[in-house]
Amino acid sequence: MGTLALTRAVALLALLLMVALFLASSAGAADVSWRAAFAGDATARAILFGIRLPRALLAALVGATLAIAGVTFQTLLRNPLADPFILGVSGGAACGAAVSTAFGLARVPGLVPLVAFAGACAATAAVFLLARRRAHTDPTRLLLSGLVLNAFFSAVILVSFALSKSSDLTAALRWMMGTLFGATWSDVALLFALFLLTMATLVFVANDLRMLAFGEDDAKSRGVDVERIKLVGFAAGSIVTGAAVAVSGIIGFVGLLVPHLIRMIWRRDFRFLLPLCALGGATLVVLADLVSRIVLPSSELPIGAFTAILGVPFFLSLLRRDRA
Amino acid sequence: MLRRLSRTAALRRGFCLALLFLGCHRAAPEPAHAPRIVSLAPNVTEMIYALGAGDLLVGTDAASDFPEQAKALPKVGVGLTPNIEKIVALKPTLVIAIAAGLHPNLPRALEAQHIPLLVVKTDRLADVARSMRTIRDRTGRVQKPAIAAMLHALQQQRRTRAKPSRVLFVVWSDPLYIAGRDTFTNDLFDICGVRNAAEVSGWPQYSLESLIASPPDLLLYPDHSVSRAQVDALKERAKLTCPIVAVDENVFVRPGPRMAQAAAALNRIVDEWERSH
Amino acid sequence: MLDLRSVSFAYDGTDAVRDFTASFAGTQLVAVIGPNGSGKSTLLKLVARVLAPARGEILWRGRAAREWPAKEYAREVGYLPQEPDPTFPMRAIDVVVSGRAPFLGRFGWETSADYDEAARALATCDASYLAERYLDEMSGGERKRVFLARVLAARPKLIVLDEPLSSLDIAHVQQFSALLRDVVRTTGATVIYATHDLNWAAAYSDRMLVMQRGALALDAPPGEVMQPERIRELFGFDAEAVEAGGRAWLVPRVQR
């Protein structure tokens, strides 16, 4: 019964994503067309296949990744405010990436994503240790811990760049503000691999994970190995967040906004929300990146601003309708 | 504020990566064909024109406004995060950027497009001639003795003063950022025979207390980034009595071929101050 | 079918359940009563396998509970926590059908047969009209019925309910107590529920277990429990018995 509705919803959102990707790869600073690219124009090919397409796809992957991390954290913590950015997981990843860049480790291939991932995991662990009280994760303490950790990570990023010999604020800002500038196919490949891995893991545990929505005791009584599912869920969420931050820096709000948007339209459980969040998050970030690239003729605006500008009015209108 | 910060940042000491690039490219053979160049920094644009290679430029960053011809060239966006699509559309065979503030993704993005990137270091005065030589070797324009002329002009400005006055160069007034030691501005002070009133190194945020404790004899500020009103407010807060002089920002904060002009201007300011004391 | 043998459990060194021994079998409604903090919730969590006993053994149909595969045990023993809440808005029918989870494979989705079970369970709880409504639009009594239906959707042989009557007004307490009786009759299951309301428990249950500081103080039919001297001894409740409808009711003794 659920599968038919899911198939329909997935088809709808996949179509939206396709349209967004088409728009994103058709518009940009340079005046080139797909027709010219297929006719064999070298410049058009270089711009469309070498610049726009990897960037649009990377935007889609970053959005999908942050949204599934968000919906996973929200379900695990039974807290509508859980999100990789608010919990400090993104900040931990950015901190790891920034510190390793500041100390010249960026030249070792694959090291920055690895350190970003370690940062994300450390932040996840820290935030839960701080928020845990008698075997329960207290929502207020959780948010407070995330807030404090975020402030700490921002400080470490700034200080590490100020202290390092290659002191450079733009590099620090790159991690803190988030950008898809200079996306390459190798970024796309790396994030796609981790996205697939995480998605597969989450699908594998989805039937158990959604039961956590009713509380840990309830899930245990239904035969769910709660501790194992929590571990798997948090690890998966941290891995993808780490990878997304390593390629794009911190793009806030997606992990919070998208699951709520999806839930306002389809009020269903985690199994249902997971693929829809992936597609919805992808669409939102592709569109946000498109706007951030074209709104000014030749400079780029921070993409995080546009995920908020595009998402919030939609979010608020749904919230109002929901209240009525 | 962020723009100010990144402007400051752009002036800062660059990546080690840049040295690596310099090392690689210096050994490169002279190109058979004259390159099509995109410059990503105004001082690089000035160097290219000074070398008589302005005709090779097919595009520049948005801030490149000197010499006058540079304004007419296609712009590829802000130097720190240029628009890569626009660069590719100009079909350059060489992109030149400065090491300070180089976006870590830029080298990879251009490499993916098979567009060679030359990163030059322009943090100190001595770097200017070095970078110009590197660019000259890559452009193949060796007939014009631009570098020697520039170095000669700089030597002309060298002064030894009996009692070196203490000068402070304000980059931004609130919060206070200044030019410290180990910067091209400090190198300029050395040439003109004056001392930097600040003991700190780099382009740091400077404490008002230090400013009050050891006030400079002369305070300079860039005429575009900082307004007279802002610098007056600083003067009021720090109870400064020294003369405050605006300098041509595009000459003073661009470590390029016009550094001799900057030195000459500084000498004029200092000479006048010495006469009045 | 359910045997508890000298079961003990402690939170951080504080005993919650001590040396508890009892057996349950057949179609009956069992009320576990006792003052707050007497270990009722902990006892039910042990039965539902939410907690594992520190000492002693719980046997379900002759086999130790911990040896049962988790999902198989969950199909036979249903549990309703004190304040269940799905965090995010859900339709009643989706809540109820999630009770079928122990029957689903790893990638399985509920089939129409599962939805039929859910509809049947809602009907048993007189809650069919709630199926398409969202939980956050319901009254406390309606929510309780939906969650009871969720437990019933798995057709368990043993049903464990933690304080199902708390936060209900008196009309709903009566309604829900009657519903529990019906459930016992129609499903043939053993239903164990925790409550601290003596009179309601006595009126509807077949058997009462009185807990005191984690230990089983009395296990008897309501008629034997509802005696003023006994109640004063167990609860410190100064009561007098009033006869009505052929039963003894305990009312507070009022000093004038």
Image (tube, rainbow, N blue to C red):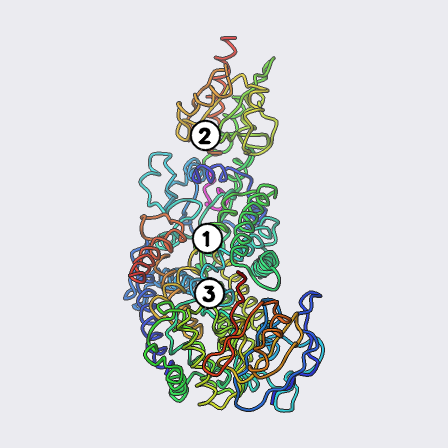
Could you tell me residue C176's position as x and y percent?
Answer: 43, 77
Work out how far the residue at label 2 is from the one at label 3, CA to CA, in angstroms: 50 Å
Q: Which residues are magenta?
A: B135-143
Inspect the image, locate mark 1, and give the three-letter code of the amino acid beneath it: Gly
Q: CA distance from mark 1 to mark 3?
A: 15 Å
Residue under pointer 1: A178
Q: Earlier in the sequence, mark 1 or mark 3?
A: 3
Q: Establish whether labels 2 and 1 are both on one chain.
A: no
**In the picture shown, does residue A179 fall above or below B155?**
below
Q: Position of residue A30 (x, y in %)?
A: 32, 55
Residue A161 is left or right of residue A64, and the answer is right
Numbered tag placed on residue B271 in the rendering: none
Q: Chain of mark 3?
A: A
What numbered label is drawn on residue B258? 2
Q: Is residue C104 magenta?
A: no
Describe residue A315's horizontal placement relative to residue B259 as left or right: left
Q: State the SS at label 2.
A: loop
Q: CA distance from mark 2 to mark 1?
A: 36 Å
Callout 2: residue from which chain? B
Report if residue B138 lies within the magenta region: yes
Tell me, yes or no, if residue C48 can be seen here.
yes
Which quarter of the rendered picture does the N terminus of chain B lie within? top left
- Considering the numbered disc 1 on the image, is that residue within a helix, a strand or a loop? loop
